[in-house]
Amino acid sequence: MPRPKDLDPFSSPRALIGKELRHLREAAGHSQDSLGELLFVSGSFIGQLELGIRRIQPEMAVRLDEILGTNGFFVRNCGAPSKSKYPDHFAEAAEAEAIAVAIKEYAPQLIPGLLQTEAYARAVFRGGRPTATEDTIDHLTQVRLERAQVLDDPTRPVFWTVLDEAVLRCQVGGPAVMAEALRHVAQFARRHRIIVQVVPFSTGAHMASEGALKLMAFDDAPPLAYLQALGTGRLEDDPATVKHYELSYDLLGASALSPKESLALIESVAEDYAHEDRNS
């Protein structure tokens, strides 16, 4: 078995560990599927570890060292890449989002994080953490705005969001904040940077009625689905499960207003908020 290589401290730790995992796996004569079977995960999960999309958790690091005979290499090196500025339940999803080539997101109540303005994000965090210090709210808001920089690239990732009409009607931060926030979304759409659709209240029950959904696609790895609820989240990589959520999203888009109709509604509601703010 070859000795694990020293890691370059100036490169992405997770990407380097993933690359080393692939090197050691192949040297040991394992396919992704055969190594996955020993770890009770899918072969696609191993592929995501090797590409740096998923994190090697401490308990898995122990098993990798045992199976590959790497003398504690993964245990020693999995700590740093496991640390994240995001909450534990969202960390892997946020880090996968940053390297995705396409993102589809259904938002049932709030504007997606990647599209939030500073004032809107601040109001979201303050509403969810009424006793938090201002420093805490400042930090959370800054992290969210930094995450949104993934859309600074003019073409990648492709971003398609379906918003429930409740997103437009829920007054986060008041009329002025909502007017700015919805105009921000509309500007992305008018620049053809994102695709946005709205599911009107008249649609009634639909395929995603039970909660938020994010789908992420990658160049060299299988897609992922992320489902979020209050204070928790789950990242799914099982191909059949992800395919089910992809179908759900496509059906949701089919039941939503067209992008043109959706943009008109978003801008109309933004103008209503602006008028309300001017007359308050």
Image: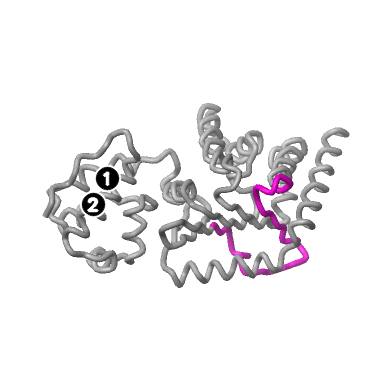
- Mark 1 burial class by Cα count in 10 Å: few <14, some 14-19, many 20+: many
Residue 207 sits inside the magenta stretch: yes
Q: Nearer the viewer, residue 149 or 124?
A: 149
Pointer 1: what residue?
78
Q: Is residue 227 left or right of residue 38?
A: right
* Disc with the residue nearer the chain's start (1 vs 2): 2
Q: Is residue 235 above or below residue 126?
A: below
Q: Residue at 61%, 38% (x, y): give it.
A: 121
| SS at badge 2 | helix
Residue type marked 1 = Cys
The answer to whether residue 60 is seen in the rendering is no
The location of residue 69, given as percent across then percent down, is 13, 55
Q: Residue furthest top?
A: 135
Q: Residue at 20%, 54% (x, y): give it.
A: 24
Q: Is residue 227 above or below residue 246?
A: above
Q: Residue at 39%, 40% (x, y): give it.
A: 84
Pointer 2: what residue?
61
Quarter of the image that includes the C terminus: top right
The location of residue 26, given as percent across then percent down, is 21, 60
Q: CA distance from mark 1 to mark 2?
A: 7 Å
Residue type marked 2 = Ala
Quarter of the image that includes the N terminus: bottom left
Examine the image and state in which quarter residue 7 appears: top left
- Mark 2 burial class by Cα count in 10 Å: few <14, some 14-19, many 20+: many
The location of residue 278, given as percent across then percent down, is 86, 33
The numbered dot on residue 241 is none
Examine the image and state in which quarter residue 184 appears: top right
User: Bounds of the magenta span?
Assistant: 189-214
Q: Is residue 254 left or right of residue 227?
A: right
Residue 25 sits inside the magenta stretch: no
Assess whether mark 2 and mark 1 are in contact (beta carbons under 8 angstroms): yes
Q: Is residue 196 left or right of residue 20?
A: right
